[in-house]
Image: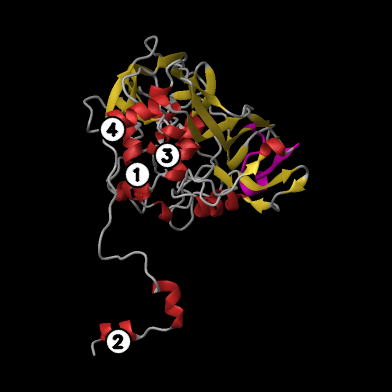
Amino acid sequence: MGGGYMQLVSYGAQDVYLTGNPQITFFKIVYRRHTNFAVEAIKNVFNETPALGSTYTSKISRNGDLVYRMYVQTDITISDGSGNGGWPGESMLEEVSLEIGGQLIDKHYSDWLHIWNQLTLTDTKKRLYNKMIGHAACVVDGTDVYGNTDNTSPSSYTVNVPLQFWFCRNPGLALPIIALQYHEVKVKVKFVAAMTTDGNSSVDSIANTDLYVDYVFLDSDERKRFSQVSHEYLIEQLQFTGTETIDAGDTTKTVKLNYNHPVKELFWVIHQPRTAKDRTDINNLKNRQTFGMYTDVSGAALYDGGTVDYDTFIRKGEMLDASGGTIFQGGAAAADTGLTSTCEEITYHPAKWPTEAKAPLKEAQILLNGHPRLSVRPGLYFSQTQVFEAHSGCPHSGIYVYSFALKPEEHQPSGTCNFSRLDLAQLKLTIKGSNEGLDTNVARTVRVYALNYNILRITSGMGGVSYNN
């Protein structure tokens, strides 16, 4: 008897739980037929020609039956000395709002786009995403401009920034615009102001800006059903109640979580104000405290100075040599810089380059009605352990999360905390002090976001959420 047959006849009572009365086979593939449909990306224009520093509205045209993915496409210009923020496609979108029938349904922010994509995209997807939004891996030869072989001008890019509304992430939640006969759908985009002396923007100007929408076209029978019946969708919304300030000299902050609805996850980031800088001047680079600076494999900092601009190392992925000034392109000879790896290796093999040494958060705790939701935990618990348990991406340091859900990236609910039923929710933060390598004589800001569930009802040609804040 052959070994395979021996395995088959080795069958006992325990196997009944696994193979008794089988319901599937792995050796005959099964598929299901689907309804006929087509998807087409169609340009939607804004009410005026967009420019930095203003808000513009795009009324979603009724070109198709359902609205699925959305992209903001624009030509951005980054001139010498300005690109200090990184991820320019994200940073130019200060706010993006969705309205149905004049009612605000959801609003996203530049920070949120960055947080969500860092948490949910795999490293392979991030490389492509970074190209889409104009985030170059390295600067070219220290000239303060981005390098991109796909464009004729190294300082000009066409970027496509994917929006992250609930219907953009799941085709089963595509917005049935065909059923909204009496309500208009609008997307409002507030573009960040052009860079001023505080370095708020990494984009100097935009041109040829449009909103591209993936419309779904249904076959006649399904189209008729969608237009005539009522719809009820479980949707996700983002809540943000404003920026909190940690005063200079303080190392603790208690943030009130004034949220509503069943919340499945909390996110927060800690910022420090930027100052104007020229990337060719090493002295000007040393004016913002490092949060998660790259180190070499021995643990030594790549700079011999005390503080280095955070964006230079993390948000843009650039590397400078320890002596002060050479910005080199990925693949450049490491022998010329004193580094043990090329920029490309550093960018694509982050495990070699620890980034948590100077992350700002020392520890945190969540309180619900004065009672600890969890005990005081170190910052690494929220930036590493929680991310490992709940997300598929590997974000850079400085992004902190706490998930009430088992699988927060999935639409299927797997755990929430109903903040509408809480009298008081608080996030207690402790920031690292000067004895732990951070300058406490600088004010910082905290931005906390909550992702919640709500119900969107569409009936009689009109739509709105069931539960307001």
Q: Dot 2 corresponds to which residue? A: 6
Distance from disc 2 to disc 4, alpha carbons, whole Å, reads: 62 Å
> Can you identify the residue that label 3 sits on?
324
Q: Is residue 170 above or below residue 456?
A: below
> Which is more N-terminal, label 4 or label 1?
1
Q: Closest to the observer: 236 or 398?
A: 236
Disc 4 marks a residue whose amino acid type is Gly
Magenta stretch bounds: 423-444
Q: Which mark is residue 147?
A: 4
Q: Say whether residue 187 is magenta.
A: no
Helix, strand or loop at label 2? It is: helix
Residue 379 screen position, x and y as percent: 61, 49
Q: Position of residue 409 (x, y in %)?
A: 48, 45
Q: Real-space Cα distance between discs 1 and 4?
A: 20 Å
Q: Earlier in the sequence, mark 2 or mark 3?
A: 2
How many neighbours does mark 1 have within 10 angstroms: few (below 14), some (14-19), or many (20 or more)? few
Q: Quadrant of the C terminus?
A: top right
Q: Please indicate whether residue 144 sits to the left or right of residue 239 in the image.
A: left
Residue at the spot of label 1: 125
Looking at the picture, which amino acid does disc 2 mark? Answer: Met
Q: Would residue 108 be visible to someone looking at this image?
A: no
